[in-house]
Image: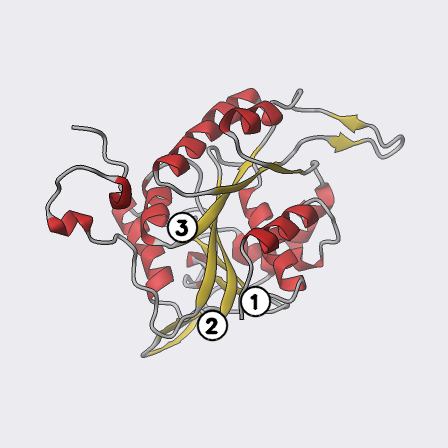
Amino acid sequence: MAECTHNCSTCSSKCDSKAKESLLAPENASSSIRHVIGVVSGKGGVGKSLVTSLLATLMQRKGYRTAILDADITGPSIPRSFGIPTGCVEGSENGMYPPKSKTGIEIMSLNLLVDEETKPVVWRGPVIAGAVKQFWSDVVWDEVDYMFVDMPPGTGDVPLTVFQSLPLAGIVIVTSPQELVSMIVEKAVRMAKMMNIPVLGLVENYSFVKCPDCGKELHVFGESKVKELAERNEIPLSARMPLDPALAALCDKGVIELAEVDYLDAFADEIERSLPISE
């Protein structure tokens, strides 16, 4: 038997009718979400949450209503970056209401539901995957144009749950220059192709450090292989971001929305063009 790709629309196997039912989790009856974009990486520590935060901020500045679903259940960092405290989620019979950042970005994360942000989540995979589904189905997302889903690294339970259960318009893949990371990222690219999820772009973080004296780009992690990776997999190389201590400081202070950098501006424009909001 051929390996199941979990995409029934392209499958010729004669499974029973139940297996062909849509795996999409139901959207909350009071929610309105137009485009869902996953932000993934093959390996941790490459700045995936930073890219998520910056893209949501940029699209919000363009006048769109944005949201972040923090699917990194065991390592949630989004609330800290936006300065949103724990235990501030309210709810009603309709569901939970996501807190809003200072500029109006709706955010839901497990760290907003606990009483201490450093309390560990010691759950097995199926429970974690179930929590991600609840953030989609049990949260009232109010008129969202672009939702960014910050996923944990790799190709395990949670990325598979998001790929199957949420109506992804596409994904953004975040990587760093090391060749080892590029090899691992290629697994995420192939997973997306298996699931028929478009790759909107590839973002390389930590591409270089700018010398503060002469402005020269220093490649502290070695020469980048990201261009070859993008060409080999026929996906766009959308941005290269430097190692920028100022951005880390803004995240630590909870004011990432104050970032004034242009690293992802062109990519945000491309997302706007490829996934337009029709009134």
Q: Quadrant of residue 204?
A: top right
Check whether the beta carbons of the residues at disc 2 and disc 1 lie within 8 A of each other: yes
Decide: is 86 above or below 7. below
Q: Quadrant of residue 239?
A: top right
Q: Which residue is mark 2?
A: 142
Q: Which residue is mark 3?
A: 73
In percent of width and height, residue 38 lies at 46, 48
Q: Secondary structure at mark 1?
A: loop
Decide: is 48 above or below 180. below
Amino acid type of the residue tagged 3 in the rendering: Ile
Amino acid type of the residue tagged 2 in the rendering: Asp
> Which residue is at a point 54% across and 47% down the rendered structure image?
49
Q: How many marks?
A: 3
Q: Mark 3 packing: few (<14 Cα in 10 Å), some, or many (20+)?
A: many
Q: Mark 1 packing: few (<14 Cα in 10 Å), some, or many (20+)?
A: many
Q: CA distance from mark 1 to mark 3?
A: 24 Å
Q: CA distance from mark 2 to mark 3?
A: 22 Å
Amino acid type of the residue tagged 1 in the rendering: Arg
Q: Secondary structure at mark 2?
A: loop
Q: Which residue is mark 1?
A: 65
In percent of width and height, residue 213 lies at 89, 32
> Which residue is at a point 52% across and 30% down the rendered structure image?
234
In percent of width and height, residue 78 lies at 53, 54
The mark nearer the N terminus, 1 or 3, is 1
Q: Secondary structure at mark 3?
A: loop
* Residue furthest right in the image: 214
